Amino acid sequence: MLLQIAWKNIWRNKVRSLVVLGSVVLGVWVGAFMVAYIYGLMNQRLKDATEYEVSHFQLHHPNFDRDKEAKYFLDNSTDLLGEIQKDKAIRAATARVIAYGVVASAKSSTGGKFIGVLPESENAVTGIGDFVIEGNYLKSNAKNKAIIGEKLADKLKVKVRSKVVLTFPAADGSIAAGAFRIIGIYKTYNKGFEESNIYVNAPDLAKLTETPNQFHEIAALLHQPDSLEAYTATLQAKHPEVFLETWKELSPELGLMIDSFDQYLYIFLIIILLALSFGIINTMLMAVLERGREIGMLMAIGMNKGRLFGMIFIETLMLVLIAAPFGLAFAYFTVSYFGEVGLDFSEVYDEGYAALGFKSLIYPAMENAYYFKIIVMVVITAVLSSLYPAWTAIRLNPVEAMSKL
């Protein structure tokens, strides 16, 4: 009986009910889509960071990560690299010679990270060769050649065929320096990355650091990222002499962001639904006060407060539950569409996103479990939003309410 009465009451004022329905649809749609946008943004950042920057895991000498000194190279690094590359779980692996120092051109100088690479395996891990926009990528037989980021090239005021001098501490503590000719300029989505990293061939840098045939770093990608913890635990147990770090240790801010996604989700949705709940409460409260005479009559002829409370409660719940599936459906189709074509912010926020390490083309995405979570939160919002209007209704005095025209 209450369901029938509540259903009829909803449509007695169609304009008001449609306003509530529209606001709920819009709120759920926007809330779900923004969650998908944030989810897609973080997933994309994780994919970019692991595939183009830090890889799934890296190996170093135990003291290298702390001191960054050239003397802390990996013992038997060539054999260790070969062992990892042969593992069927590994998609790609490479080794690097690392040095930190000053890079100088004829017009300027700045600090930088110098990365001596094996060109083919490095490209298989990071795809850095695909980012070269001017000139050419490194070749293994090229001597004293370098590729640098576009941001760094602008800072040093250099171009392809210009020379730069790299100065840094060698393994014995002396200061080493070497001149390199730029053969390529690369551009990535991460301005901070391209402003500091210079790539040269590993033998050239190893010669200057006095660490011939040794590497400071091994980086690898797995075929199955979900197996990262199990694989690295096994590898660490097998080689306890090395210091192993996963992408979470290498990029702790990214790990914190991924681990905190659920908290971000709930906080964001609570803000959206809280704003929505005030609109629902306001509309339903107006409906109750406008129907004061009717409610007073119902109470006068014997409707108890429990039934009256239930009627207003059901009306509010019906409105929200009718609208919420439409909002989620719109969100699902919107997310599916933009998940394929992407949201391109390159004309507006390209520099801003790049400064933070994000691409300006975002592909929204959301797991099905989050749609269920949103439904649960919407139902909770509907229940809470119905309490005050229903409580106001049962507080009306029947005689006073009936006297109001």
Image (tube, rainbow, N blue to C red):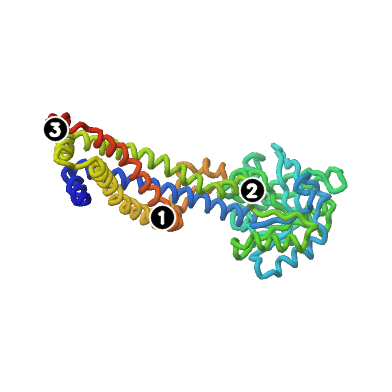
Q: Quadrant of the C terminus?
A: top left
Mark 3 or 1, nearer chain start: 1
Q: In the rendered image, which residue does mark 1 sit on?
A: 372
Observer-side mark, 3 or 1, equals: 3
Q: In the rendered image, which residue does mark 2 sit on?
A: 251
- The x and y percentages for residue 26 are 32, 45
How much space separates mark 1 and mark 2, taking CA atoms?
31 Å
Q: Please, what secondary structure does the residue beneath circle 3 have? A: helix
In depth, the one of 134 and 226 nearer the eye is 226
Question: What amino acid type is highlighted by mark number 1?
Answer: Phe
In depth, the one of 157 and 197 nearer the eye is 197
| Residue drawn at the location 15% of the way across and 31% of the way down | 399
Q: Please, what secondary structure does the residue beneath circle 1 have? A: helix
Observer-side mark, 3 or 2, equals: 3
Q: Is residue 111 shown above or below 87?
A: above
In depth, the one of 79 and 204 nearer the eye is 79
Disc marking residue 402: 3
Observer-side mark, 1 or 2, equals: 1
Q: Please, what secondary structure does the residue beneath circle 2 have? A: loop
Q: Specify the quadrant of the image occupied by residue 131.
A: bottom right
Query: Badge 1, how many Cα within 10 Å: few under 14, some, many 20+?
Result: few
